[in-house]
Amino acid sequence: QEAGGRLDVVVQPEPPSLMLGLVTNGPTQLVAGEIYESLLRYGTDLKPQPSLAESWEISKDGLTYTFHLHHGVKWHDGKPFTSADVVFSADKFLRKTNARLRVSLAHVASITAPDDYTVVFKLKEPFGPFINAFEASTMPIVPKHIYEGTDYATNPMNNTPIGTGPFKFDKWVKGSYIHLVKNKDYYLEGKPYLDEIYYRVIPDAASRAVAFENGDVQVLPGGSIENWDVKRLTAMKGVCSTGKGWEFFAPHAFAWLNNREGWTAKKKFRQAIMYAMDRDFMKDVIWNGFGKVATGPISSATNFYSSDVPKYPHDPAKAKELLKEIGYDGTPVRILPLPYGETWQRWAEAMKQNLEEVGIKVDMVSSDVAGWNQKLSDWDYDIAFTYLYQYGDPALGVSRSYLAKNIAKGSPWNNVEGYNNPELDKKWAAAAVSADPAEREKIYAEIQKEIVADVPVAWLLELQFPTIYRCNIKNPVSTAIGLNDSLRDTWIEK
Amino acid sequence: MTGFLKRFARNRGALVGLLILLIVVVVAIFAPIIEPRSPWQMVQRPFLPPFTMSGLPLGTDTLGRDVASGLVHGARVSLIVGLVSTLVALLIGVPLGAVAGFYGGWIDEAAMRVTEFFQTIPSFALAIVLVAIMEPSLTSITLAIAIVSWPPVARLVRGEVMALRHREFVDAARLAGLSNRRILFGHILPNAMSPIIVMASLMVATAILLESSLSFLGLGDPNIMSWGYMIGAARTVIRSAWWLSFIPGVAILLTVLALNLIGEGLNDALNPRLARKGR
Amino acid sequence: MSLALMILSRIAKAVITLLLIAVLNFFLIHAAPGDPAKVMAGEAGAADPQFLEQLRSRFGLDQPLHIQFAKYMWNVLHLDLGMSYRQQIPVLTLILQRLPATLLLTLTAFGVSLVMGIALGLAAAARVGKWGDSVITGMALLFYATPLYWVALMAVLLFSVQLEWLPAFGYDSVGAGYTGLAMALDRLKHLILPALTLGLFFMAVYLRMTRSSVLEVSQMDFVKTARAKGVAEGTIRRRHILRNALLPVVTLAGLQAGQLVGGAVLTETVFAWPGIGRLMFDSLAARDYNTLLGVFLVSAAMVILFNIITDIVYRLIDPRIGGASR
Amino acid sequence: MAVLSIRDLTIALPPGADREDAVRDINFDLDAGEILCVVGESGSGKSMTANALMGLLPQEVKIRSGRAEFEGHDLLALPEAQRRALRGDRIGMIFQEPMSALNPLMRIGDQIVEVYEAHGRFSGAERRARALALIKEVGLPDPEKIIRAYPFQLSGGQRQRAMIAMALALDPAILIADEPTTALDVTTQAQILDLIRRIQQKHGTAVMFITHDFGVVAEIADRVIVMRQGEIVEAGSAEVVLNAPQHPYTRDLLAAIPSNAIPEPEQVAARPVLEVRELRKTYQTGGGFLRPAREVKAIDGVSFAVAKGEVLGIVGESGSGKSTVGRAIVRLVEPDSGQILLDGRDMNTLDPEALRAARRRVQMVFQDPYASLNPRKKIAQAITEGPIAAGTPKAEAEARALQLLETVGLDAGAADRFPHEFSGGQRQRIGIARALAMEPELIIADEAVSALDVSIQAQVLELLRDLRTRFELSLIFITHDLRVAAQLCDRIAVMRHGRLVEIGPVDAVFRNPQDDYTRNLLAAVPGADWGTELAAPG
Ligand SMILES: Nc1ncnc2c1ncn2[C@@H]1O[C@H](COP(=O)(O)OP(=O)(O)OP(=O)(O)O)[C@@H](O)[C@H]1O
Ligand SMILES: Nc1ncnc2c1ncn2[C@@H]1O[C@H](COP(=O)(O)OP(=O)(O)OP(=O)(O)O)[C@@H](O)[C@H]1O
Ligand SMILES: [Mg+2]
Ligand SMILES: [Mg+2]
């Protein structure tokens, strides 16, 4: 390992803020992941690893989680980091601001700090995925001495974030770049290796590819260029890529099907859609072979995946037959593509074409991100593309889309399709609170088998967003959240 | 009239322009006959270069759709957007400018404030916002383009009408007992036609370009094939398949060029001074 | 009327226009589907009603529209454009950060297109009817008819990827720490492609305008007078024809300088130029109403400013213009 | 002694022009110190000849053959550089349009200085001093101010003086003046003519003076050349050509000039058709936001009456308010105060509907025959439009239109043509037919003949006389040409600065003017002492 050097990474779009405790969108995570840390990290096998917590224990009954913190950790402003910060972050700050953590915190009875370097979480009941909640974007530890007693959202320090991570915030030229510098007081000896990181804002995908080719940036995070360029760039000399680093998120692409009204409310119609789609073509042509056709709600990268489910191969004849059975009258259905760039647009076009081939009339609806959000929140769609993260555990990232209690207007992230299956609801709940992995595995297998037959949504692809980088950049991705985690282990070969 | 045609025909550029435009119009009208296949249909493997497979003279795009078919069907949309938005812009701008110029006073003042308002917001920005608000569709795009392009028409017409309304033939019409409306529409406007026609021909061109720019920013109508869409969709593969954006680019260029040439020809033909001097 | 008075009255009118723009824009923008809270919640990848509620009340979006409107107008009247919802910093700060880049780009493009357009227009007019004229006007037509972003992409491919002469994007060499002359040179290098791309279209417009205007003025009686006086051709062209021919070009340029600001959106996108055109587009996507309104107001102000400057220039060139009422 | 002798000059026109050659094989001499007038109908090649001498022919027009000897050189064969050196130095030129002949963006002083500059004469300070002196010499007021003024700040006459100053800056041997006074009103014209003659005498310049006004010729010419269709048909001393013309064309031209004899006024009825009382109209001009406006009293308390069948002439110099009075009567201009009584009914109190009805009874023939016809409407339409709007059935209106065209001496085919397909005189007659179509009781003819060639002018006057007797029309005849007024009118009103300075029977006003202004006006008529005396002695 060699120390020193500068790394240029694309960030797209420009993050609204770097205060990870308040804003958790992708670009913010990418940058702020260098600044803020949580108690644990997760390997690409999703196993927890030490971070701010040196070690931890979980009681047998699965109700008590005890974390022992690193000594000698300092905030970027030089103040010491202690367990009080952790308690403040989890119990006060994030409870108020982080929707994702709230799901886990609902199971928590108390958070206490017996001493400066120990934190204890006590749960009300066992919650299987709880150990997955200590990732940097779910539970970023924020400095108590800066935020306590202030209005978190308007605290002026949000613009100059203070964390414990390996890199410190230096400068943000809006619309152009964000500059981070090495944290010389980082608690791990010799780390980080890099001197500085520039996150570059380049709004046009084609320009981003050019930037990489020209050497202006050395790392392209997954999804920052269109798929067609991925193939071209990875074929270049001295360019490496990795599919790793998305295990925790396991982005799972599917299309919401409106289960409430119209033809999509009919199960057979939804099945017809599944048969009509040529998902291998979608994978090969639109995603350039990246990813994997999804078989059901749980990604094969996530724990508790089961492949023992009904299969939906590309079978137009079958689709036509199903449509005939239910007497489909040619009423057009509306497709709402995900407004995230050309790939998604092409994808919707391909689906439209597939559906029209079996006789389903399709209107493509167009909107920008805001309009898309609005339409989903208002359930104003028939078919709508999306992809969701699974956060390493079905109870965190999967069940939310299928539970009846999550049917509520106003959010694009709950049970938007309106699927209501009380039987399954019970099973989801049972699987979540079980402390025994084997039992969880069994219940999830049952769930998957049943739900896939119902087709509440049209599962499409387990997405893969390869990270592309110059081969002399070593170790850019070492954990399950990839570049969103800190680059403390990354170094440049001269 | 015949003199006008003669003058127009003398301008070789204008004739070439007319020819190109005619071809485009014919292609647009008969698109379904020339290329019965839907331009969205995926017919072959993607990224076939042009002239490599018979039946697909221009190759295929990123999804394996026939580029030639896209080009033919795209002509329709581009022309419709260009013509209809220009028409709408004229329908807004001409009466407004005419009434403002003819009546003057507070009517003029009010009309010009409104016009100024629309001119003060950068037009492309306004178009973007309007399309985003109305959600992209052929109608909203056309309307948005029309809304941002009428102010110059209104100003032009107002200027012309103001210059014409004190001309003696207008006074003569007034003495003949004609109503204001007949004077304005029967006597003044016909005489302001030539600059309006010339401007309109340029506006059609600008509108086509605007539509393609909107498409580029992802604000096109996803249900219809247009040249702008084709370029926008192909720009991400510009490095590996440059021809995909080049072909529709050339189509736009030729059409706009044609309209420009025609506009210039009209300009010369309608301007007796230039026509006589032979430039 | 004196120049100062003219400027004052124009500014007074401009303020009214700007307020009108603020009013109309407010409602226009709020008519768009979606709201900033939803967009931010959407990006966060998870949201519950509580989260949305927090955002809305923080942004003041939970209040009725007319109250929001009253507040906004009140603030605008106090020259306060509010906070950016998304970035949580004052809109004015945000805009002022990005404005220099846009000004640099648009003014350069404007200057280049004007100077080149006029020069080429003159050259074409001097060769009217000959092949030189055809080449120049043909070129102009080509620039006029080619989509801007397409030119931009091609220029990048040629000059930065193939030839590696110029940087492909950005405002400066990030982190190079240049100062003084090196910095200026660096800026310049970054500026060339976007400014040319943006300027080409307008150059074509000015070229054509100049050419026809020069041809028109050449026919005028006073040119003949000058010849009758025995003035040399070159002097006639410079002193008599050019100045008079420039008047319509100046008018047009004044009108279009404003459009340049809007047209910069595309160029700023392709060249990752950190200007307000891109800021506008991003704010629109995020429904960051305050920022969007702010950008609109600022660019409208720039348009008005350009118009006032045009009028001043016009008055400087043309002694006949004395009144403001035109 | 000839300073300039032109031999066998032929100027070729480009294909598609009126004729093959603008001028063909013309020969003439210009003697030192003389004023040579070139007259002839429009398009006869006068300007082409002048431009050829200056080397200022339009690109597409070429000299086919000929020589022009000047100071030992053939002007036509000189290379451009040497020609340029002669222009403005040895040969000066003045153009017709004072409004457009000066660069609108340059100060008068600079434009004069430019002449010195172009020929590399004098130093900067001396140039300015000389320019000042010139401005003084051509009689421009307040030279210090004028030198810094822009053309738009000068009146037409002042601009023409500035032009003359420029042409004379280097004391040229030859001055070519191409219709330098045609665009000016009589009084100003008289001053300019006077100036040219004075300067010519002082410097001994040879002047080639192009005009189509025989009055002007009579005023200043030493010798005259008459041109027609590119040929010189007659040349000789002014005396001879004017009084004993040889060529039939010259005789025609001279015959067409209204004679100065004043015909017996017709007997007219006493009943007034129109009465104008204390009419006032003030224009606010040039004013803008925060700027005081300049006031022009275009009509300042004018009263008069017109009897049935009477022809009332309104004369006066340019800008005296003649047209404004005419327009105010039909309310194309809203008067500020005063009454316009048409058969006793006040036009000013009418609502729009009644006004339209009343307007039909008063029609106007406009000054400019080009401008008053819509170029995009056929003649039939132009004539029938009014009657149809008034309720006449279309067929009837059309039949009547044909009849009227015949009345004004045009054949029926004219109905189907567009205005640009007619000559100026024909257009003027169409305008009259249009007015008659409304069957008015009163016609206001605003400078109805001033734009016409003398020969055509005569035709139109004849027509008006005829119509007046046939239809018992009343006529208000606005003109600045006193000869024409004398020919047609029963009574004459003289206007100045918006006021009626004098009104009375024609012979009384012309032979015995009461007002100084009327006397000045009469004196300014060019060639007044040529032919019969207009301003009679005493
Ligand atoms: N640029 C031109 N191209 C072709 N023909 C021309 C051009 N200029 C003038 N002519 C023609 O040349 C002839 C002579 O024109 P010229 O201007 O010398 O007439 P003119 O005697 O000065 O008449 P006017 O009294 O109306 O000024 C006319 O028949 C006219 O139509
Ligand atoms: N619309 C107007 N606005 C301002 N001033 C005007 C307007 N029309 C005429 N005037 C002024 O009113 C005065 C009288 O003009 P009018 O046209 O009646 O003169 P005229 O006697 O017909 O002159 P001419 O012989 O040149 O036709 C002039 O000083 C003129 O400048
Ligand atoms: Mg002439
Ligand atoms: Mg008049």
Image (cartoon, rainbow, N blue to C red):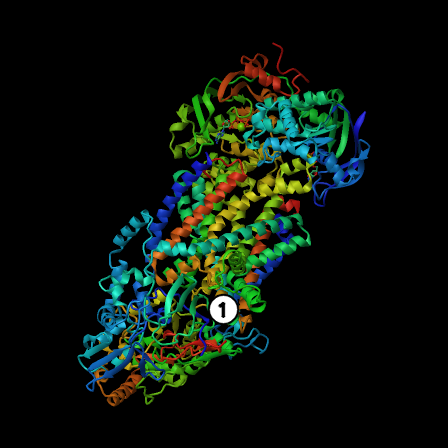
Residue under the image location 24 percent in, 76 percent down: A117
D392 or A162, nearer to the observer: A162
Compared to B278, does D241 lie above or below?
Answer: above
Compared to C148, does B106 lie above or below?
Answer: above
Percent x, y of residue A306: 32, 88
A208 or C21, nearer to the observer: A208
Residue D229, can we see it?
Answer: no
Residue under the image location 50 percent in, 25 percent down: D321
Percent x, y of residue B145: 44, 57
Residue under the image location 65 percent in, 40 percent down: C236
In the visual, does D58 lie left or right of C42?
right
In the visual, does A126 lie left or right of D107?
left
Percent x, y of residue D82: 76, 38
B133 or A429, nearer to the observer: A429
Percent x, y of residue D116: 68, 32
Badge 1 crowding class, 10 Å Cα cut-off, few under 14, some 14 to 19, many 20 or more, is: many
SS of the residue under disc 1: loop
For disc 1, the marked residue is A216
Numbered label tally: 1
In the visual, does D122 lie left or right of A293?
right
